[in-house]
Amino acid sequence: MNRPDSRTAMFDWFGETIAPGEAGNVQLAVGESYSSMTVDIQIHIRRAKEEGPVVFVTGALHGDEINGCGAIRQLIQDDDLQIERGALVLIPVLNVLAFERHSRYLPDRRDLNRSFPGLADGSLASRMAFTIFHEIVMRSDYGIDLHTASVRRTNYPTVRGDLTDRHVRRLAEAFGAEIIVNSKGPKSSFRREACSAGCPTIIMEGGEVWKVEPGIVETAVRGVKNILRELHMLEGRIESPAYQIVLEKSKWIRAERGGFLDFHIKPGDIVEKGQPIATSSTILGEDQSTLYAPFNGVVIGMTSLPAISPGEPICNLGKLPRKYSPEKLARLRAREDGLEQQVLDDLGTNVLVTEPPENVAEP
């Protein structure tokens, strides 16, 4: 794909001119509703007087994932966010049609995040993806896409990106999350296709759908500002956690029996191999089976619904590299009294965590 010169593209955004040192709101038409009304994406652009990178930040690519919307709205309302060079493109709601339905999916039941780079004459999802891709991604130099877990799940804040791309790695490390997951992303996903087109893009996953959670919002806002500082677009010091771990593998631990779960872990917990994860019991509280950690890991996501049937996913466990021991990370965490600990505590209130049954040992 041929990318336009971003310095030229900055001047004219969808019929509106954003002059050096100015900020403004613009709209991008991406389709029509059933009532033939134009469907617009609302965009806020801040342009510095000095030329530099163009960075987009998007939320609600899945329409029910609105933590990112809350974070981007906070950035827009921050009058002290004065960039020194380049341009910042802030899009609280990318998937407007799904957002209005409080749904992950578009009215045609397609996933917009599996439809990129799209086709001008394709399905509804494909046409929207085509417009978004060519009018936003192809005008930008870097991208940050904010997500949450899917329905009935919650995620500890993680950054995900293809770390074989040095520019993506730079963004991922600068963002300042404790956990970085090395992955290209699914085929036809927004960030994978953006990277393929020459716009290094990462995503942050954190929290639940249909919520704007303070700790997740603060994590996202801090991460965006960290990246802007890394790119010399914003003054200030990059804020980093006590440690960063790159995960190469993860596994969903699945229920063996149906019933009601007693959780023994919470999002973000560091667990040792053989540690109890959850115990399934009958509705009357009779224990049936206990799930155990198959390796040393970190809980990067888990179900928030304790009623389960066999085979349903319970916990997404990221495998710790050998050089990181759970004991060492626990000691580092014990010294952590900042944002990471706040998020760990906040997310822990969303699930009821109990002690495992007495005399339980790994089989």
Image: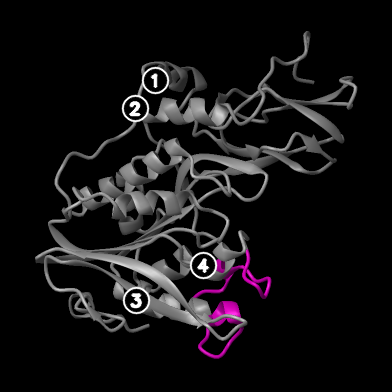
Question: Mark 4 touching mark 3, by CB under 8 A?
Answer: no
Magenta-colored stretch includes residue 121: yes
Q: Position of residue 102 (x, y in %)?
A: 61, 59
Q: Could you say which disc has been placed on residue 95 in the image?
A: 4
Residue position for label 2? 242
Query: What's the residue at 51%, 22% (across, down)?
Result: 326
Q: Callout 1, which amino acid? A: Leu
Q: Tell me how far mark 2 sits from mark 4, CA to CA.
A: 35 Å
Earlier along the polypeptide chain: callout 1 or callout 4? 4
Other residues around mark 3 within 10 Å, as few (<14) / some (14–19) / many (≥20): many
Earlier along the polypeptide chain: callout 2 or callout 3? 3
In this view, the mark in front (1 or 3): 3
- In the picture, residue 215 is in which quadrant? top left
In this view, the mark in front (4 or 3): 4
In this view, the mark in front (2 or 3): 3
Other residues around mark 2 within 10 Å, as few (<14) / some (14–19) / many (≥20): some
Would residue 173 be visible to someone looking at this image?
no
Earlier along the polypeptide chain: callout 2 or callout 4? 4
Find numbered disc 2 in the image and state the secondary structure of the residue it sits on: loop
Q: What span is in magenta?
A: 105-127
